[in-house]
């Protein structure tokens, strides 16, 4: 199975969550023309996809995939937090940044848990 096939075979709530995260990154594209924070998000997303693809090739659809988010999204969340009040006149981008921080934070809760479980020996394919 491909990584996408694995993701789409997850429980409905996981597929919905993955869709929310994907939409967040798609929404960053038009905003990137007006603000550097969505640009940073797009760059980080690209790096995340590269690492996650490499991890999938090496380990399959296991909990270690969360490591890509841990590595890239933890500093991204810190960066967005630090710059959350920049350009207060850009109301919609400020709202977007706050939503992005919330989505990334929630995702990181799952990702840290997955990586810890993997390190503790849970090497099974996720969802089986």
Image (cartoon, grey):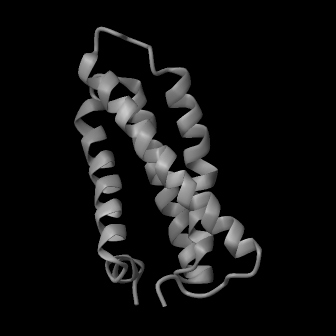
Above or below, 113 against 36 in this view is: below
Image mark count: 0
**Horizontal side, residue 8 vs residue 113: left or right:** left
Q: In the displayed structure, would residue 38 be above or below residue 5?
A: above
Quarter holding residue 121: bottom right
Picture coordinates of residue 84, whole percent (x, y): 46, 21
128 left or right of 67 in image: left
Q: Is residue 7 above or below residue 98?
A: below
Viewer-nearest residue: 113 or 54: 113
Q: Which residue: 47% across, 60% down?
A: 49
In percent of width and height, residue 66 lies at: 57, 64
Q: Position of residue 34 (x, y in %)?
A: 28, 22
x 42%, y 79%: residue:
3
Q: Quadrant of the N terminus?
A: bottom left
Quick one: 94 or 2, which is closer to the camera?
Answer: 94
Q: Residue furthest top?
A: 89
- Out of 116 and 55, give the one closest to the viewer: 116
Q: Give above or below for 106 relative to 89.
A: below
């Amino acid at each position: 199975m491909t990584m996408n096939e694995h993701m789409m075979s997850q429980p409905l709530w996981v597929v919905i969550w993955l869709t929310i995260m994907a939409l967040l990154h798609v929404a960053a594209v038009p905003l990137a023309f007006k603000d550097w924070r969505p640009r940073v998000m797009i760059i980080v997303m690209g790096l995340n996809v590269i690492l996650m693809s490499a991890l999938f090739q090496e380990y399959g659809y296991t909990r270690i995939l969360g490591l890509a988010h841990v590595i890239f999204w933890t500093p991204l969340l810190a960066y967005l937090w630090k710059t959350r009040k920049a350009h207060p006149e850009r109301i919609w981008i400020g709202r977007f940044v706050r939503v992005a921080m919330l989505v990334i934070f929630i995702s990181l809760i799952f990702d840290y848990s997955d990586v810890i479980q993997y390190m503790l020996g849970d090497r099974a394919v996720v969802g089986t």
